[in-house]
Image (cartoon, rainbow, N blue to C red):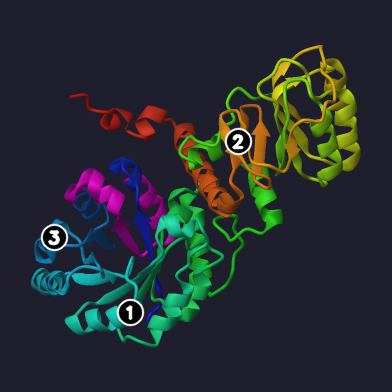
């Protein structure tokens, strides 16, 4: 039985970066090198030519994701040096058969990607009959963020077709062994390698996990439990989370009382009015240990919170408070060291009139927040994460963090941010 191949997916926009990472991955033992869709769209067939020239002894894969003119695209990639060309399974039958014919003519293999195909078993059998050389079970990045994996489909297709199966989609040292056992013979790994500060060592770990069919723990994408979500949101920054949410989720103009706070917990929402501190204080009795009281106080300048309320929270183990309004007793709060985030800090308090409600949907810092949403705060400010998207955003934030770790490593080696991301090339063209 042929040993499974490890394929690195170079889904980067910058060819020099991709080549550098590929060099390190080759040192770690990678078998196949893929010019990923992002790289091909960014650099064209030059990326395939460059990789083949740099690594003449390695199998070069062109992830064309061809959906039309299969013969032309396969010819183009094959002449550039690709030995495997990837065509989409959702393409017309004629596109796939033309790709297969061109592959035979120009000496390349055809891999059919099942991304987006509804009946994967039926389609896999069809493209096998057309002459495809590989089936790729591919879970896209957006699906990965919600916990999708290729394992179940690999298992099903391994009993349905006779050509080799490739598996792709969030695979790492914890998960590659399972897809190998399920029947995959090409293991495609992207981010777990390309975002690693030490690509060579990470590649070696992946090869070990594949060849020995063993699980090597990692902290990459997962279906997080509530406890693990808390851990992830404690490790990433609000900046990471904001990037993961397309620069959204920020509670504008809400700042920490002092630097050094890290606030993480699920929201107990409160609506009140400027100076009316009854509902904010009553919410302390409602909130559970580890939760965050978050208060819409109409951006008011009269305090609805102070030292005694904070002491009550600290005694109950409440994680912190976020107020779109005013807080007082600053000196005492600083010595208490209870995480407080607010819009204003003032000396004057209001009166407990009892207007408002607890547990309702509120608007705070220009952002809608519901009871049970995740709240994360640090020196940069506060972000709110809808509870129904918490696992997805945790994965996306970790993805941002890992990408930044890799860029930081390249900067430490003597580069600069603009050089690493090839900034000039991607500045907006003004017409």
Tell me which residue sits at (55%, 40%) in the image: 241
Q: Is residue 30 above or below residue 98?
A: above
Q: Which residues are magenta?
A: 19-46
Percent x, y for residue 48?
21, 53
What is the quadrant of residue 290 in the picture? Answer: top right
Q: Nearer the viewer, residue 23 or 38?
A: 38
The residue under label 1 is 164
Mark 3 Cα-neighbour bin, 10 Å: few <14, some 14–19, many ≥20: many
Query: Which mark's residue is nearer the viewer, 2 or 1?
Result: 2
Judge from the rendering whether residue 425 lies leftward or rightward of residue 404; answer left or right.
left
Q: Is residue 27 visible?
A: no
Q: Nearer the viewer, residue 330 or 170?
A: 330
Tell me which residue sits at (32%, 59%) in the image: 33
Percent x, y for residue 17?
35, 42
Q: Nearer the viewer, residue 170 or 312?
A: 312
The residue under label 2 is 383
Judge from the rendering whether residue 380 lies leftward or rightward of residue 331; answer left or right.
left
Q: Which image quarter is the C terminus in?
A: top left
């Amino acid at each position: 039985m042929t040993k499974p191949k490890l394929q690195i997916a170079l889904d980067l926009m910058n060819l020099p970066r991709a080549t550098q990472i590929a060099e390190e991955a080759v040192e770690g033992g990678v078998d196949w090198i893929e010019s990923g869709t992002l790289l091909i769209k960014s650099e064209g067939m030059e990326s395939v030519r460059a990789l083949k020239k740099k690594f003449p002894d390695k199998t070069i894969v062109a992830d064309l994701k061809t959906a039309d003119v299969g013969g032309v695209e396969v010819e183009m990639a094959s002449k550039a040096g690709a030995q495997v060309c990837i065509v989409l399974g959702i393409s017309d039958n004629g596109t796939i058969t033309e790709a297969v014919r061109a592959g035979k003519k120009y000496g390349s293999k055809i891999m059919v990607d099942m991304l987006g195909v509804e009946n994967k078993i039926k389609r896999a059998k069809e493209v096998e009959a057309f002459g495809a050389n590989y089936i790729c079970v591919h879970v896209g990045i957006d699906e990965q963020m919600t916990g999708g994996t290729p394992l179940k489909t690999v298992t099903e297709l391994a009993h349905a077709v006779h050509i080799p199966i490739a598996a792709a989609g969030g695979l790492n040292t914890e998960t590659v062994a399972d897809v190998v056992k399920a029947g995959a013979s090409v293991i495609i790994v992207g981010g777990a390698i390309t975002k690693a500060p030490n690509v060579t060592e990470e590649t070696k770990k992946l090869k070990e996990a594949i060849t020995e069919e063993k699980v090597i723990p990692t902290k990459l994408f997962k279906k997080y439990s509530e406890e693990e979500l808390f851990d992830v949101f404690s490790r990433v920054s609000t900046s990471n989370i904001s990037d993961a949410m397309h620069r959204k989720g920020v509670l504008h103009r809400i700042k920490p009382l002092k630097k050094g706070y890290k606030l993480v917990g699920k929201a107990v929402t409160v609506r009140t009015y400027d100076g009316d501190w009854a509902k904010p204080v009553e919410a302390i009795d409602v909130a559970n240990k580890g939760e965050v009281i978050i208060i819409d106080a109409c951006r008011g300048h009269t305090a609805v919170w102070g030292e005694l309320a904070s002491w009550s929270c600290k005694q109950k183990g409440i994680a912190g408070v976020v107020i779109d309004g005013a807080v007082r007793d600053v000196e005492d709060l600083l010595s208490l060291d209870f995480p407080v985030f607010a819009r204003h800090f003032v000396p004057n308090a209001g009166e407990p009139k009892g207007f408002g409600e607890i547990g309702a949907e509120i608007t705070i810092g220009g952002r809608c927040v519901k009871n049970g949403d995740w709240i994360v705060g640090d020196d940069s400010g506060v972000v709110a994460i809808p509870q129904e998207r918490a696992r997805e955003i945790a994965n996306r934030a970790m993805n941002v963090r890992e990408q930044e770790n890799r860029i930081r490593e390249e900067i430490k080696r003597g580069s600069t941010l603009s050089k690493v991301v090839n900034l000039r090339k991607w500045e907006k063209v003004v017409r």
